[in-house]
Amino acid sequence: MFSAIKQAIGDRLATFLSKDLPGYQRQDTASIEEVAAVLQKGDILLIDGNTRISIAIKYLTQSSWSHACLFVGDNGDACDVPNLIEADLKNGVHLVALQHYANFNLRICRPVGVGAEDTQRLVDFARSKLGHRYDLKNVFDLIRFVIQKPAVPNRYRRAMISLGSGEPTKAICSTLIAESFQSIDYPILPRRNGGKGEHGEVPQYYKRHFTYFTPRDFDVSPYFKVVKPTIERGFDYRQMNWQAREDSAPLV
C-alpha cells in the first residue's frame, strides 16, 4: 500500500515538474528539418528544456542542457518519425519524434570512430530499455530544487542530487544513454588513475558508474564531436542576406 501511495505522489509531482514555463526563447536558426538531415544513428541530442524539472537540472549541473535523447533511426529519416529514445517523467523510456523538439535549442553530440556493428549494439541495448519507468527517486530529489534553490557553491551542486537509483527497471535520460554507451565500452568522462599501463606506455582509465552522468557530460566529453547542421551543409558567411533596419534599436 505504501508503494502505491508513493507512486501516486510521484505521478503528481512528475506532472508538476513537467509543466512548461512561459518566456522560453529558441535562439537556434537551423530548422528541425535541417537537424534531421544530419542526424546519424548513435548521435545524442541535447535539449535546452523549459519545464520546471529542466530548470532544476540546469541549475544543479551548471549547463544549458537539461535533457538528452539517443537517435536510433536511419540517416535521412523525416523529423516526424519516432526515432529518438528518451526517458521522461510521464512516459518512462519511450520513442519520440524529433518534431517534438522543434521549438527548442538543440545540440548534436556524435561519438567518434564507432563502427556499424558497435552502433547497432548500442541501439539494441537502448531499445531493450523501452517500457522501463523513469526513476521516481529523482522526482523527490529534484522537487527540492524547484521550490527553493539553495545557495551552494557550484562545485558541490552536482553532489546534491542522486542521478538514478541504478535499479534495472528504472532510468533517467542521461543515465539511460550513458549505460548504453558503456555497454560497448565507449568513453564518456572516464577517470584516469594517474598511473601508466603495465609497460609504462598507455594510461589506464576506469568507468564512472552510469548513474553519475548528466546531459552536460556528453557536451564536455572529449570523445564526442559537436555537429552543427548549418556548418555541415557548407556554411559561407559571405552568403548571408542581411536586412537593413530602419531603427537602431538592438534585437533581443
Image: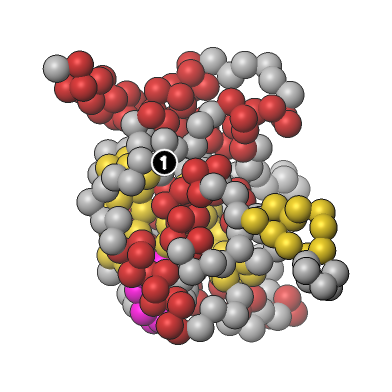
| Dominant secondary structure of the residues highlighted in magenta in the image | loop
**Residue at the spot 49% in from the left edge and 63% down from the top edge:** 181
> Image height check: is 16 above or below 26?
above
214, 191: nearer the viewer: 191
Which one is nearer the viewer's eye here, 181 or 59?
A: 181
The quarter of the picture where the C terminus appears is top right
Reading the image, the residue beneath label 1 is 166
Residue lying furthest front: 198
Number of callouts: 1
- Alpha-carbon neighbours of circle 1 within 10 Å: few (<14), some, or many (≥20)? some
Residue 114 horizontal/vertical position (percent): 54, 78
Query: 158 above or below 68?
Result: above
Q: Position of residue 50 (x, y in %)?
A: 46, 39
Looking at the rendered structure, the secondary structure element under dot 1 is loop
Which amino acid, mark 1?
A: Gly
Q: Identify the residue at horizontal 73%, vertical 62% (top origin).
A: 204
Q: Quadrant of residue 150?
A: top right
Q: Would you place residue 37 above or below residue 142 in this image?
A: below
Q: Is residue 250 found left or right of 147 in the rendered image?
A: right
Q: Position of residue 129 (x, y in %)?
A: 30, 56
Residue 14 drawn at (x, y percent): 32, 30
Residue 218 belongs to magenta span? no
Residue drawn at (78%, 67%) of the image: 197
Which region of the structure is painted magenta?
71-76
Q: Is residue 141 visible?
A: yes
| Quadrant location, the N terminus | top left
The reply to whether residue 28 is in sight is no
Closest to the observer, 209 or 18: 209
